[in-house]
Image (cartoon, rainbow, N blue to C red):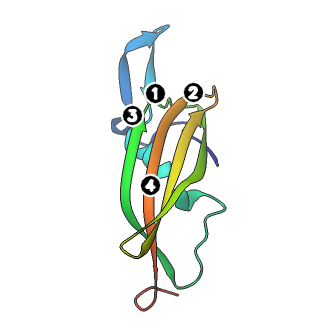
Amino acid sequence: MNFVLLRSSTSSTLRQSKTTTRGIFRQFIPRPLLIAQSNVTRSPSFQLPPGMAAVHAKEQVEYFNPGRVGKTFRVCWNVVDVYEKRGRLYQVKEALIIDEDDTIILQRRITDTYIAGEGVVK
């Protein structure tokens, strides 16, 4: 999936660097926005069978470089581990956000488990 942040609706959602490039402030994308764009549910291939629900168990995020406004970003998801704990299966997925210059912006590891049955909307 690709996405571009061209501008923000309010200036308070952008941070500006104190260093300038040819007199123009460089604008950075807020980290929470990058995390929101890297949810596995945003993947076109993400699908749960009817009656199933994902339960978020754990997360780890590492930032490598700032995302800059106006750049195009690519998000890649991979399942990196599946394990069982206390009779329940867990799936660990890795999301990687890379900009148009192939610079790694963010790496995220998400651990989910899945449930089915009553109380889950079908």
Q: Earlier in the sequence, mark 1 or mark 2?
A: 1
Q: Earlier in the sequence, mark 3 or mark 4?
A: 3
> How far is disc 3 from disc 2 in space, using C-alphas?
20 Å
Q: Which residue is the site of mark 4?
A: 110
Indicate the secondary structure of the residue bearing disc 1: loop
Gap between marks 3 and 4 measured at Cα: 26 Å
Secondary-structure class at tag 2 = loop
Q: Position of residue 75 (x, y in %)?
A: 59, 45
Q: Are marks 1 and 3 in contact (CB under 8 Å)?
A: no
Residue at disc 3, secondary structure: loop
Q: Is residue 43 above or below residue 73?
A: below
Q: Amino acid at mark 2?
A: Thr
Q: Quadrant of residue 118?
A: bottom left
Residue under the image location 50 percent in, 7 percent down: 22
What distance separates the C-alpha of mark 1 from that of mark 4? 20 Å
- Residue type indicated by callout 1: Asn
* Residue 82: x %, y % from top left: 51, 61
Residue contact between numbered discs 1 and 2, judged by CB atoms under 8 Å: yes
Q: Position of residue 18 (x, y in %)?
A: 34, 15
Q: CA distance from mark 1 to mark 3?
A: 15 Å
Q: Position of residue 54 (x, y in %)?
A: 46, 71
Crowd band around label 4 with a 10 angstrom C-alpha radius: few (<14), some (14–19), many (20+): some
Q: Tell me, for residue 103, which label it has, or none.
A: 2
Point out the frontmost of discs 3 and 4: 4
Q: Which residue reaches farthest bottom?
A: 118
Mark 1, residue position? 65
Q: Which comes before the other along the chain, label 4 or label 2?
A: 2
